[in-house]
Image (cartoon, helix red, strand yellow):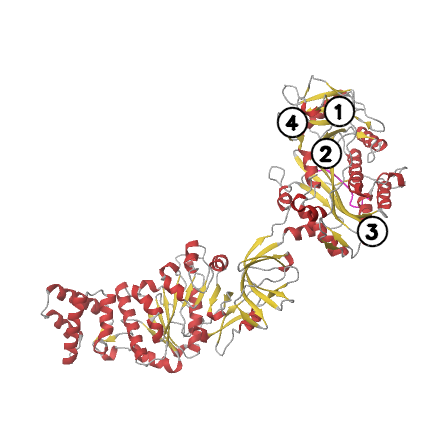
Amino acid sequence: MKLYKKEGNIIQVLSFPTENAEKGDYLMVEDADAAKALIVQVIDVQFAAVPGVLEELLRTLPDGGEPIQGEDIDPLEIAPHITYIQDASLLVCKIRATLENGVLSPSSSWLPSRSQSLIRKLSVPALMKLAKVDGERPVILGGTKDSSLLTVDATDLDGTLNIITGKKGCGKSHLSKLLMASLVGYKATVVIFDLNGEYGSIGMTNDGRRNMYYDKIYALTPSQNFKVAINQLHLNVVLGILVNALHLPGTSAREFKRIWKQLKDQGKLTLADLHEAIRSCNCNQHVRDALASRYFSLVNSGFFTDNLAEAALLEDSLLKAKTQGGAIIVNLKNTGNIDRQIIVEYVLGKLVDSLQAWKLKAVFLFAEEAHLYLRETYWDDIVTRMRHFGIFTTFITNQPDTVQETIYRQADNIFLFNFTNEHDLDVVSRAARVDAETVRSIARDLPPHHCLTLGRVVRDFPMVTRVRSLDLKTMGETRLFFAAQK
Amino acid sequence: MVIEQYTITTTPKYNFPQPTPDTPLPQRFLELSINSLRQVHNTPLQINPQPLLHPAPTDCPTQLQLKRQPLTLTPNHQETTIAAVDTSTIKIGETKTGIIIAIRGATVQRQNRNYHYTRLGPFIFHVTEENKNAVYNNLERDCFHSPHSGSYRFTPPLMQMPTRLASLLERWLQTRLARTANNAVILFDGSLTSGTIDTPVYRMREILSAARRNHNTVLAFSKATSMRINGYLITDLLPQGEAPYLLETLGLRFKPPTVPLGDVYVARLHKANMAFRLDIDCEIPTQSRMDAVERLLGNDALQNSYPETLRLAHILCTFTANEVLAMQHFITRRHGIQIVNRPDMHRLLFGPFGREGYA
């Protein structure tokens, strides 16, 4: 390989067919005289502009488009050399860092010697060693092209905002399960909004046996094994549900607050008493109607109960998970849109309460297709306020434009699967920790189950990985009509 | 005694004569090529050498006249093989003692509306003042078993060696084609003028006579001619009339030792207003000449009045920049010749005014 050109932080390297470099590979451009090296990543592979190639191609097709037949008597065997030159490629590479005295810096301000520089491929383990991507809590994401493992540190997911995105069927949920299981393995508390009911069996292996996570999985299905006793609710949690999920106006919310406090003081905080209090409330008819309609929404959700015995408290699961680690899976599969929002408001409100009271240290929250249940204002809450409380969110989506731009700008890690749509790639490339060229060029060509990892976990060295398989019972496959008929 | 002949092998589509893999000339070319390259092992090579010196054009005949009455032609679609030969040469670089050149030849045949080519080479030679006699004379002797071969007086100057070696290969290919084709129209690039330093009369006579023995007709097309009448190029003096046609020339006299072995015509073979000098073997009866051109018209595509078969032969043997790079790569890898970029003196002295072609 030979250094050909440098423009800004892009360099072009001339590569010959035997050198076999591909998109995503890392190269080291070593200038021995300068005692420095550039670490660059191949973001595109093009044909080298070899003079005469057009003529070469044209003369093989002069006969009305049909290749002309014949034989070449080439005793000196020049033809392989012609092919060698003709198939030379130009590697468009992004400068990621400069290596000087064994220390990496993000500088690209110097120019290595074009004639003297030695260019060689840099293996992922070697790069990870240079970048000091190691730690006490390794998480093996998967295998790289050079048959090495990409191992990140779970600590780098701590206190971060993460996004897992890619088009459907490419393995997003699989990666989120891998991250979740790894975090649980390190005794972290994980809460999952399980939109499709696919995380519930994570405690089982593929063949139906219990796995090491079995005792740490708390699958909560609203209205079934997950109900909330009304008298155990905090007023701010209920108001959050009414205002944010059920859109209760301010005047009505004030009246509700008064009723709630009155019932609480009287020790009569039950669904029946709440209904009676609303019905007999001496207030404007419209306010009474508004309160009544929200009351029936709460009751109809089946999520609230007066019976303490059937109320499985989220708090209990959280406390269990706090000591040994665990995953609280909130199954939202069979819930309606309004009910879903009620449940999410409740869970988030409860988490904030627990974290504020230091009942919990921190929680890793995995939110699948969050736009389906997260209100507008929560996006900012999650990336700013809730992070300070200790809620570290991972968004999982196949529609990147449904995640707000502010989320991308502040994302610490992005796990990007294949996208072919330009619009989707544009959205993802707004992330602060990634350059648009890398996203557009590499993500477009990612095969299924391959992920481009960007951000803090890889020290800003984008890495392509084939996500490793898990011995977990997955339920995320799409149900097919014709599957049984095959 | 081994008879030099082409083997005929049947392919699913074609039945063209093919040279045997061990025909003497390519083997001899190969041996001389490798021997010459061995002499420059680990020698620096300059890759921006001065352009080749082309041989001076032959003298123009005097008292030349052009018949104004065109000989109109009618395409004859009787199945006829059209065959063409061309060679090409290029200088790859200069060493301290000489030059490195490459030559390649191609024959193309059109039969049953299909083209088939055979390409020989490239052969790469390192030619120096010391070895040029050996290279040229040995090749000439091996090609033609000529009694005149091996004589120092026939060896060309160093800078003319590329064209002269290419010319040797071209004459050899023409000879092979003339001997192996039957009832074909054979197309040469250039003229049938002989007696020049690279085309001795006896050699061209041999080629033409071999062709006639096999009932072939040789037609030689010149892409450019210097023949003028009253100051005008003969190919510009086209009468009004429907193409295709030929115009006969009269009064063709060359200064000795140049001998024309063909009669010269102006051929306008397509409605496009372009014409070429066409030399036809003068030993062939007039009617057979007309018949050969008509069979060419009926069996080959003629874009811009130039036969496609000959165009392909030219295209296939011409070196592209990519191939030059590949040959430089070959001699670097196989023979350890280092490529150095010596400064171009014109550029160095005159900057942007030192370009090639500026006087």
Instruction: Give the chain of mark 3.
Output: B
Q: Amino acid at mark 1?
A: Val
Q: Give neighbour class at mark 3: few <14, some 14-19, many 20+ (Cα, 10 Å).
A: some
* Mark found first going from the N terminus, 4 or 3: 3
Task: Say if residue B202 shows up in the picture.
Answer: yes
Instruction: Give the chain of mark 2.
Output: B
Do tag 4 and tag 1 residues touch (Cβ < 8 Å)? no
Q: What whole-number distance in Å separates the C-alpha atoms at marks 3 and 1?
A: 42 Å
Q: Up-down: is A147 above or below B132?
A: below
Residue B113 drawn at (x, y percent): 65, 33
Query: Going 56% across and 71% down the picture, which residue do you hit?
Result: A125
Q: What whole-number distance in Å separates the C-alpha atoms at marks 2 and 4?
A: 22 Å
| Residue nearer the viewer, A175 or A432 | A432
Query: Going 66% across and 19% down the picture, which residue do you hit?
Result: B239
Identify residue for label 3: B35
Q: Residue furthest front?
A: B349
Residue A410 drawn at (x, y percent): 40, 66
Residue A36 drawn at (x, y percent): 60, 68
Task: Say if residue A399 shows up in the picture.
Answer: no
Magenta residues (range): B14-23
Q: What whole-number distance in Å separates the C-alpha atoms at marks 2 and 3?
A: 33 Å
* Mark found first going from the N terminus, 4 or 1: 1
Identify residue for label 4: B274
Identify residue for label 2: B83
Q: Amino acid at mark 3?
A: Asn
Q: What whole-number distance in Å separates the C-alpha atoms at marks 4 and 3?
A: 45 Å
Residue B264 is marked as 1
Q: What whole-number distance in Å separates the C-alpha atoms at marks 1 and 2?
A: 20 Å
Residue B342 drawn at (x, y percent): 72, 52
Pointers 3 and 1 within a single chain: yes
